[in-house]
Amino acid sequence: MTLSGVQATNMSEERPRPTGGVLPLRLLQAIALLFLAAKLVMFAVQRPFMDETYYFLWGQHPALSYYDHPSLVGWTEGISGALFGWTIFALRLPVLLTLIGDLVLLYLFARRSSGANWREPFWMSAALFLSMPLLAALTGTALPDHLLIFMCLGALYFMQGFLATVDAGAPRWRWLYAGAAMAGLAILCKYYGALVGAGFLAALLVTPRYRPLFRSAQLYLAIALALAFLLPVVIWNAQNGFASFAFIFASRQGAAHWWTFGGTPGYLVSIVLALSPFLVWPALRFGMDRSSPTSRPAQAITVLSTLLFFAVSTVTNTIIHWNALAYVAAVPFLGSFIRSRSLAVAHFIYGALFFALIIFNYSVMPLVVAIGHGDDASSSSGYGVSEVAAQVASLKAETQADFVAGTDYSNASELAFALHDRDVVSLSEKTEAFDFWTDYTALAGKTAIVVTDPWHPLTSAMRAEFASVDPAGTVDVTSFGKFIARYTLYVARDFHAQP
């Protein structure tokens, strides 16, 4: 025995859970493949979402890190853009690659748990992964979350493998180091990727058979390896007044209203909607299960993430995808806790309805427009941008303007992507990633084409940055005869940035 104090425990001591599914294998395969086909349709037809174009623009301005999030999404989008240009294919290629990686990892989980009987567990977990509403959305767009999901699954696979070798009495430390590397990369996707490593350490702490690992130097070397991936982020923050840390841990949360629980009802509802009402009970059973010690890291991540953002919801509002790691960690194991055929069928129907709505919303018409109620910038994202960009290009040539500007990161990023112009400027009064790569002094005295949308008008402070601002036309965006939004173009002369 190479690890002092850890008693070898045969893996057969874990109570095997049933690997057979509640649905026939052929049906599971058909369901998973249909959802996968719908995902590929999303990749092809869904208009670029405003945040996707924002992160693509990060990749056109390489840096150690960025204001809103750590570096990995900017780096991957930058590589893809360098290889394949300013195209939808380049924008979403990293997403496709991580989706393939996710499915491969789910296959490996199934092979590990069920050996030659891997087919039903794999196809069930794949179907759940592809149909769970929040994960379906996050693995279909070029947001940092698609990278975070892959890193989390990878870390869990290696961590579980390491614990299995500990139980067998011969720890394979390379599995631990591989898991630590993936956990470090998870932090490089989003700051709360730290929950991946925290969950693993919590699992060791609450499981008596694994506590002696804390006496091993190798565990601390693995922790150091994971933290080493944060070095570019730390350096960038040190160079920029710790702006990103301040944004994530203070500014982004808004004003805290201590213990008012104002965001809690919305958070609890978001769990049901994001996971699906029909998976809540199986997920609870997974979280409380004690039959498999090697799945404790996944359980710990699920519990820690859910409790953390519950605590956040007691003082401020939360966003539905913040708790994504809780659902990701459960996916490889969740199928074993679904005992009801009707529950499984109901979930897949729920997931199919979500897919239909999301594809309709981002490729046919915003739902808020279709139902004639509400006015949502995110739902309308991507609509009409090519038409607006064509008008902007024409007006810029006509007026000999020097640069193009939007009034927010969202419309500025969409314009930049449509125009293939990395130098589009955002005039927003809020701090954004644009502020860290734009040389405002170099724009002094120059003329801009400024574009506004209904959600981000031209403010008096923005007007004050130019000697004159003159309206130069509007672009009405419609879909199937339904009015969506009106964009307004301005010619703004003699720029002088406000201090």
Image (spheres, rainbow, N blue to C red):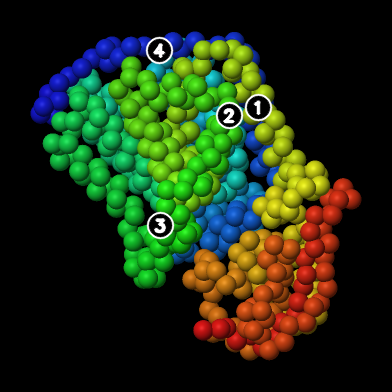
What number is the disc on residue 198? none
Q: What residue would you read off at disc 3?
A: 249
Q: Real-space Cα distance between discs 4 and 3?
A: 41 Å
- Front residue of this view, candidates 220 and 483: 483
Is 389 drawn above or below residue 304 in the view shown? below
Q: Is residue 11 left or right of residue 385?
A: left
* Residue 120 in sight here: yes
Is 212 drawn above or below residue 415 in the view shown? above
| Mark 1 nearby-residue class (10 Å; few <14, some 14–19, many ≥20) | some
Q: Real-space Cα distance between discs 2 and 4?
A: 23 Å
What number is the disc on residue 350? 1
Q: Return the disc, 4 or 3, that comes first in the chain's sequence.
A: 4
- Asked which secondary structure carries label 2, the reply is loop
Check the picture and name the quadrant holding the N terminus: top left
* Residue 126 in sight here: no
What number is the disc on residue 17? 4
**Residue 438 location in percent, x, y?**
54, 74
**Residue that appears at 63% across and 18% down:** 345
**Residue 292 location in percent, x, y?**
33, 19
- Front residue of this view, candidates 184 and 406: 406
